[in-house]
Image (cartoon, rainbow, N blue to C red):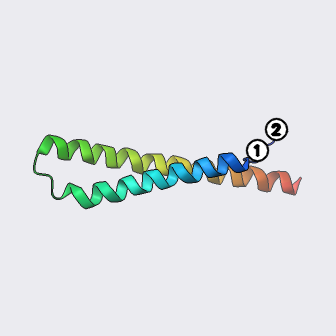
Amino acid sequence: MANNKLTPTEVLELHELLNENILSIKKIKSNISMVQDENLKNIMQNTLNNKKTKIQEFQNFINNQLNAQNNQNNN
């Protein structure tokens, strides 16, 4: 069976990517109400949705990693 454990470098990179996406969401949410141009507002909303989707993908990845580790530990 393949080793599914993340290296410390990979964990750090994942942490940085998550933080980057979370920070982007916070910035967009705080600024979108001040934007008057509808095209820009739509772009910001699409970006917000994409960031939320990316965070969900990271969460799924982390859960899959944890499940794989638990399965290895149980065998």
At 76% from the left edge and 44% from the top edge, which residue is drawn?
4
Query: Which mark identifies residue 4?
Result: 1
Instruction: From the viewer's side, name the closer residue of 33 and 66.
Output: 33
At 43% from the left edge and 47% from the top edge, which residue is drawn?
53
Task: Using residue 46 as the reference point, say whether residue 36 is left or right of it.
Answer: left
Quarter of the image with the N terminus in it: top right
- The CA distance from mark 2 to mark 1 is 6 Å
Query: Which residue in the protein does label 2 denote?
Result: 2
Q: Identify residue type, mark 2.
A: Ala
Task: Using residue 70 as the reference point, say whether residue 51 is left or right of it.
Answer: left
Q: Residues within 10 Å of mark 2 (few under 14, many from 20)?
A: few
Where in the figure is residue 64, as x and y percent of width and height?
A: 66, 49
At 29% from the left edge and 54% from the top edge, which residue is drawn?
28
Where in the figure is residue 67, as x and y percent of width and height?
A: 72, 53
Q: Are marks 2 and 1 in contact (CB under 8 Å)?
A: yes
Q: Is residue 59 visible?
A: no
Query: Which mark identifies residue 14?
Result: none
Instruction: From the viewer's side, name the closer residue of 34 and 55.
Output: 34
Q: Residues within 10 Å of mark 1 (few under 14, many from 20)?
A: few
Q: Secondary structure at mark 2?
A: loop
Where in the figure is residue 20, as x and y percent of width and height?
A: 46, 51
Where in the figure is residue 5, as x and y percent of width and height?
A: 76, 48
Q: Identify residue type, mark 1.
A: Asn
Question: For residue 32, which quarter of the picture?
Answer: bottom left
Task: Using residue 24 as the reference point, say whether residue 10 is left or right of it.
Answer: right
